[in-house]
Amino acid sequence: MAHCKLTPIPSMPSACFIESVVVWKSLRGQGIGSFFMNEAEKYCKFNLKLDEIYLSTTDKEDFYKKLGYEPCPPI
């Protein structure tokens, strides 16, 4: 249904990148992406004990803004 890749940031031990976020095309628009990102964030916070999550996107800025992400300088 969905996939993402978590990548550590060597210079920032309390942070990671969420990469390659994908929801099957036939399941988009049903709230699965938002649910999936929320679960990924909880996993990062509670299981990996991370304080920050970064991502990179060129075409889904509005989706991530709805989830509370904000633009930042390159990491």
Image (spheres, rainbow, N blue to C red):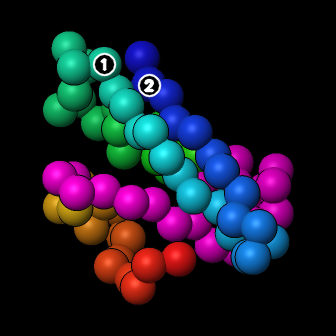
- The residue at 65%/50% (across/down) is 7
Q: Earlier in the sequence, mark 1 or mark 2?
A: 2
Q: Is residue 27 above or below residue 72?
A: above
Q: Residue beneath label 1, please?
A: 24
Asked whether 1 or 7 is in front, the reply is 7
User: Left or right: where does residue 70 sit relative to residue 15?
Assistant: left
Indicate the quadrant where residue 70 lies. bottom left
Q: Which residues are magenta?
A: 41-60
Q: Position of residue 38 (x, y in %)?
A: 50, 50
Kind of element beneath mark 2: strand
Q: Residue beneath label 2, please?
A: 2
Q: Position of residue 20 (x, y in %)?
A: 44, 39
User: Left or right: where does residue 42 sit relative to residue 4?
Assistant: right
The kind of residue tagged 2 is: Ala
Q: Tell me the quadrant of the picture where the N terminus can be found.
A: top left
Picture disc at residue 37: none
- The residue at 57%/58% (across/down) is 17
Magenta segment includes 61: no
Quick one: label 2, few (<14), some, or many (20+) residues within 10 Å?
Answer: some
Contact between marks 1 and 2 (CB within 8 A): the answer is: yes
